[in-house]
Image: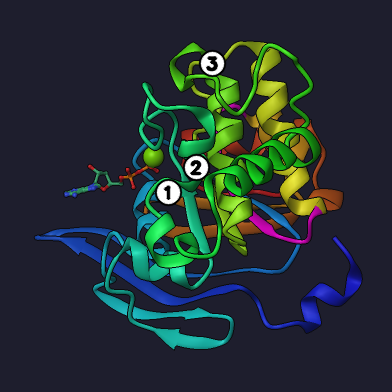
Amino acid sequence: MNQNTSQQTPIVELRDIHKSFGRVHVLRGVDMEVGRGEIVALVGDNGAGKSTLIKVITGVHKPSGGSLLINGEAVDLQSVQDARRRGIETVYQERALADQQALWRNIFAGRELTNWLGFMNIREQKREADRLLRTRMGFTSRAITVDSEVQGLSGGEKQGIAIARALHFEAELIILDEPTMGLSLKETDKVLDFARGIRDAGKSVILIDHNILHVHAVADRFVVLDRGRVAGSFRKEQLSRDQLIEMMVELHHTGQLHVA
Ligand SMILES: Nc1ncnc2c1ncn2[C@@H]1O[C@H](COP(=O)(O)OP(=O)(O)O)[C@@H](O)[C@H]1O
Ligand SMILES: [Mg+2]
């Protein structure tokens, strides 16, 4: 991350965000921001509210209180599409892709009508899909082409396509909620590389991953969520991998955050 980032308007800013489901108060006043070109890891125990928080940012849930700013503007997101139009994409594993369709169709799925129909023909779409795969996502295998069916791909490759799709549509912030779940080590490395690739392209990432080792390896900053509140925020330079692990274990056992 470059040093100017802190002076720029954050892509996303949360101010005192609350979310309740009936009487269950899940988010209890979250303040957080995501700058440009950074990977922010959201860490915390199961049930801390990580997924709920990202669902507020992606337009799935309306907050019960507080404000959400995108590029400095207070917004009241109406839907996931609304968040997308503002440059925020979530990559879900598997679900986002249609197994029995060719890879290139998956990259453009659902967007042809609004963006491309009329000025981008099939050949151009395929060419663009090929460019994204080989240059942006580092797919080098000859066995995979834009005409390959998605069902023949590995979990890591599917993640790569979903991410390529988000990049193509110029998302400014890509949210990865447990993207390495169920993947092999090698595939996990690939997905973590995708996250770095997004950052290196000047976009931002929110990463949620159970594995603290993955998180520490790629994130620039860690935001610790504990029972619906931000317990702390740390830059990678401030915290070694072991310190991060120790901190999370201690938080789990004592409910307190101590930083060495
Ligand atoms: N739609 C919902 N209705 C009721 N409770 C929910 C809903 N979504 C999440 N919760 C509750 O909110 C808490 C936080 O969940 P979640 O955000 O999924 O946590 P995390 O992703 O950190 O594991 C959990 O106790 C969960 O049961
Ligand atoms: Mg979750």
Residue at point 45%, 50% (across, down)? 226
Q: Is residue 76 magenta?
A: no
Closer to us: 84 or 49: 84
* Residue matched to label 3: 153
| N-term mark: 2 or 3 | 2
Judge left or right: residue 50 versus residue 243: left
Residue 251 lies, in percent from the top left, at: 53, 41
The verdict on label 1 being within 8 Å of ligand 1 is yes
The verdict on label 2 being within 8 Å of ligand 1 is yes
Instruction: Determine the CA span between mark 1 and mark 2.
Output: 7 Å
The furthest residue to the right: 3
Circle 1: is it few (<14), some (14-19), or many (20+) Cα within 10 Å?
Answer: many
Residue at point 68%, 11% (across, down)? 143
Closer to us: 214 or 176: 176
* Residue matched to label 2: 44
Residue 184 lies, in percent from the top left, at: 60, 11
Q: Is residue 223 visible?
A: no
Residue at point 36%, 56% (across, down)? 55
Q: What residue span does the magenta drawing correspond to? A: 201-211
Dot 2: element = loop
Instruction: Determine the CA span between mark 2 and mark 3.
Output: 31 Å
Dot 3: element = loop
Dot 1: element = helix
Residue 159 lies, in percent from the top left, at: 55, 31
Judge left or right: residue 140 versus residue 22: right
Instruction: Determine the CA span between mark 3 and mark 1.
Output: 29 Å
Instruction: Please name the amino acid that badge 1 sits on.
Output: Lys
- Name the quadrant where ligand 2 sits: top left
* Residue matched to label 1: 50
Foreground disc of the pair 1, 2: 1
